[in-house]
Image (cartoon, coloured by chain):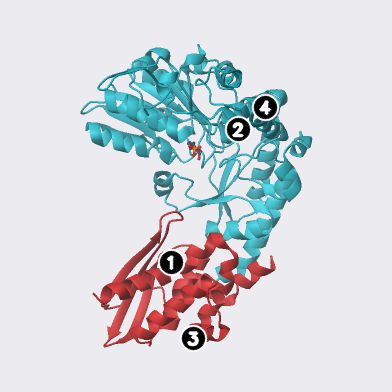
Amino acid sequence: MDNLEELYNDIIMEHSMNSYNKKELKSCDFCEMGHNPNCGDEIKLEVKLNGDIIEDMAFTGHGCAISQSSTSVMIDVLKGKTIKEAKDIIETFINMIKREIKDEKELEKLEDAIAFKNISNMPARVKCALLAWHTMEELLNKKGE
Amino acid sequence: MDELKKDFPILNSSNVAYLDSGATTQKPQAVIDAVDKYYKTQNANPHRGAYSLSIEATRVYEEGREKIAQFISSETSSQIIFTKNASEALNLIAYSYGLENLKKDDEVVLSIMEHHSNLVPWQFVTKKTNSKLKYMYINENFELSDEEIYSKITDNTKIVGITHVSNVTGTINDVEKIIKYAHKKGAIVVLDASQSIPHMKIDVQKLDADFVVFSGHKMLSPLGIGVLYGKKNILENMNPFLMGGDMIEYVYEQETTFAPLPSKFEAGTQNVGGVVGLCAAIDYIEMVGYENIQKHEKEVVNYAINKLKELDYIKLYITPNESNHSAVVSFNIIGVHPHDVASILDANGVCVRSGNHCAQPLMRYLGIDSTCRASFYLYNTKEDVDKLVDSIQKAYKMFEKYLSK
Ligand SMILES: Cc1ncc(COP(=O)(O)O)c(C=O)c1O
């Protein structure tokens, strides 16, 4: 139970239940849908760029507390970053969940998203935490095409 | 009855409240022992060897068929076809009966409660044959009304697919009525007994169903063995589903004649160990007795329903008509996603399933993404229910302060 209460911490709960990032942007440059058919979780990410910088982001959709909060926290972390920085942060997040980070210092750049670290102890929920990050990764990769 | 738990090693050693028997049941020691004994003393390839061990494996396999025929009151044992699970049996029917017999503008009628296994194959087959796929919807009590049955099954209906018990709502459908009406309209009926046979006596002749399918693993047997029953004249007129060894008579370079029932539908080396386990499971169920199983389950399930009804933040997806409800209880904590609830329950030693339960069209019809589902079986006790309710309360507490905003 210890692990679990650590996991459902304030950051995750606040972001999942009352996220200010859950809205539609007035105008956006890119959008991408992500879904986990097995659980029915669905999100739509919207991104507004200013040159190379992620100027604004928002999401809509529905799902469990983990997928919703992970999306919202990701938006907080990536807003204002360059595309290159964003890609690096996404990769670090995914590696953290997969427990492939050797140097804990690397995690600093994840800011609040570090709150999801213990998800790796709950294999059944890993894909909930990764949904937004994979969706954003996809969006950025497509953008480069 | 509370003593039965002792017969299930996994429930003894782990101390979890196992409330996911609708997905698969745990296995009693007697079943594990029977399978163990088969592999230690009787195993060989059935039907293929002239030596005594192979003859022994064949005997065990065919005696299993006899036993299952008796268990569900089949006219003959040749109408019992072994498959790997209910899904394979349903695919067999869709391909070998549906694909061959459906014509343009014919109708296949299903209930909206069907498991994907009794739904997706019919989508495929109706598309291929240009026939129509229609649904009978449930009412506010999660039941099929007579009106719905009588208006959807028409003179054009050729096949009706119906689950005996819903794996989401636990509704017991009035399948005798549906079968009678379908026959009156000239349709055949595919009865999915996966969620009913663990809990109630199935008499295929009394039901008069044309096909009945179920999986062994939901009724105490090992994984990987399922049963298809069919009416003899229907099965005899069907083409094989899978082809290969054991299901043939003569094979020439360009032509083959097929073996008679039941071998026609059993290609390749069969799961004798699974049949042995299924037979031991039937022995166990008969030893306890369906009447006792039902009485015990009613007590535990009603206890659970009453406890859950006391929590005003719980929404239940069950019929208020107790006699139409089996041992599955779907619920949600209002405002909290079922996956979060299931994770918190898991951390408290309670196993429930969360998700769409392989019934996405039903979920969409109900306007929800998913539910938590507690499903009960003969080994569950009121203590399991107490654990469930306690941990639901804990889960709610974790979310409460964020929900109120
Ligand atoms: C009503 C119903 N039908 C069919 C199935 C499919 O069973 P299996 O996965 O063993 O083929 C299930 C079980 O998941 C079920 O609940």
Image colour assigned to chain A: red
Find out whether the residues at labels 4 and 3 contact each other: C-beta distance under 8 Å.
no
Is label 1's Cβ within 8 Å of ligand 1?
no
**Same chain shared by disc 1 and disc 3:** yes
**SS type, badge 2:** helix
Q: Which mark identifies residue A131?
A: 1
Q: Is B23 left, or right, of B100 in this rendering?
A: right
Residue B395 or residue B242, whichever sits in front:
B242
**SS type, badge 3:** helix
Q: Which mark identifies residue B219?
A: 2
3D distance between C-alphas at marks 1 and 3 = 20 Å
Q: Which residue is mark 3?
A: A109
Q: Position of residue B189 (x, y in %)?
A: 40, 23
Residue B238 or residue B379, whichever sits in front:
B238
Image colour assigned to chain B: cyan
Mark with earlier residue (1, 3) = 3
For the residues carrying marks 1 and 3, which lies nearer the camera in this image? 3
Q: Amino acid at mark 2?
A: Met
Give the vertical position of A8 relative to B308 (above or below): below
Residue B271 or residue B44, whichever sits in front:
B44
Q: Amino acid at mark 4?
A: Thr
Q: Amino acid at mark 3?
A: Lys
Find out whether the residues at labels 4 and 2 contact each other: C-beta distance under 8 Å.
no
Mark with earlier residue (4, 2) = 4
Q: Is B308 left, or right, of A93 in this rendering?
A: right
Give the image quarter of residue A83.
bottom left
Subunit bearing disc 2:
B
Q: Position of residue B83 (x, y in %)?
A: 47, 29
Subunit bearing disc 3:
A
Q: Which mark identifies residue B41?
A: 4
